[in-house]
Image (tube, helix red, strand yellow):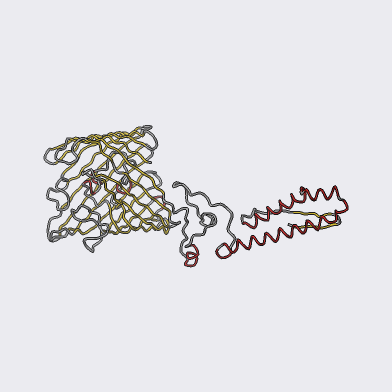
Amino acid sequence: MCIAKSKGRVEVKCSMTGKPRTTLRGRTLAGLAVFLFMAVNSTPPLRAQQTDAPSDSNKQPEALLQRIVQLEARLKDVEAALAKAQPGGAVAASVPAPAPAPPSAAAPASTATSAPQGEVPAHQPQAEQTGTEPMDLNRTLLRIRGYSDVNLHGTTLRGDPASTTAFSLGQVNLFVTSDVSDKFKFLSEVVFEAGNDNVFGVDIERMLLTYSFSDYLNVSVGRYHTAIGYYNTAYHHSTWFQTATGRPFLFAFEDQGGILPIHNVGASITGKVPSGSLGLHYVAEIGNGRAYRTSEPVQNTVDDNTHKALNFAIFARPEAIRGLQIGFSAYRDLLTPAAPLAIDETILAAHAVYTGLDFEWLNEALLIRNAPRGMPRVFNTPGFYSQISRRFRSYRPYFRYQYVNAPANEPIFSPNVGLQHGPSFGLRYDMSEFVAVKVQYDYTMLRGDRAFHTVALQTGFTF
């Protein structure tokens, strides 16, 4: 802003060039310029002096200059007061903070302007001093997604607590995520589920804090789904994601009679392997492993031995065939039951799956090898399943065949496992983007020429 004085008149010229400034001082000066322009052209007292008292025209410049001096003094007082109110004497930015991004939106790269207006995170000065990554208060808000299902099922199998035809409430799964920062991510699954005693319980099925160094190295700690095969990490506790009403028997959860260590507590490292169009990935895990025949096989806080379970998996996602994944995993643990003999457990798994938009084909095979120490015998339990489906608009018919054969005197598994194999036929109908109805028929053959039928009707939804 500049002011020019000449004989009998005063010229006030204001110009703004370049990019607009977003500071409080920039906006205040711009407002002052507009105010002065209006004061020169439309102030009633000055107009009256020009028309009614021509002899006093020489006093107009002095009055205007005096008014400008007063306004500049007031501006300096306001800036001084604001400087005292802000940490470090900086003038706060007047740009309003952006609204929190939806869960599907990408997180902003910069955290400088995402704090609420007029607020500075208390830890930020310390983070700048120590070189740690600052936290974005807007992005650390929890994002919660819910999943659940309601079922009607019946079976001809007798002697099982769930053999009667009944309605049942499925799991209520709250999937919670948070971007703690650009590098730290948090994930958890809190599940509400009723058992055969009709009493609801609460389980933290997954709880992971992950630090991403790069696409090639991600470190996670907490409770996770063990990377054995494909199904266990591709489909979690919600039936909404999977095509069928339930998981293959090989990948059933521990509390439902499953024979695999589905969950583990410890640390994992994941990432890409430089391999070009082959798309190799790796997973390395270390954890407490599972307990032997207890009500809670997942050792959340106490491990019954100092030996740790190890698992390594590698898989390929070739760019030439989108949706194809081929992989292999090896799991190793030491089980220490109450009996004197410890058991070395090895689980080998291989998979080849294709999941396209309309076509799905899942194939997995496993071998569980339990070797009691001090005994010459090794107990091998093989198993596999194959599932294929095709979508026709809102309908997806599917077929699955599964097989598992545990020795009769297997030292780890329940005697009810034994030999199980047979086909499943089903149909999934997506009523909307958030609700799916499924009907499935299973025919299961057991050792000793026994067999039973099962029919299930399920409504799964997300909210």
Q: Position of residue 267 (x, y in %)?
A: 32, 59
Q: Position of residue 218 (x, y in %)?
A: 38, 57
Q: Quadrant of the N terminus?
A: bottom right
Can you tell which quarter of the image residue 430 is in? top left
Q: Position of residue 456 (x, y in %)?
A: 25, 35
In the image, what residue occupies the spot 19% across and 35% down?
453
Q: Is residue 105 left or right of residue 325?
A: right
Q: Is residue 214 left or right of residue 57?
A: left
Q: Is residue 29 left or right of residue 300?
A: right
Q: Is residue 456 above or below residue 2?
A: above
Say which of 121 and 437 sits in front: 121
Q: Quadrant of the C terminus?
A: top left
Can you tell which quarter of the image residue 404 is in? top left
In the image, what residue occupies the spot 82% across and 58% down?
5
Name of the residue lying farthest toward the right: 55
Say which of 304 and 405 sits in front: 304
Q: Is residue 322 above or below residue 67?
A: above
Say which of 191 and 298 sits in front: 191
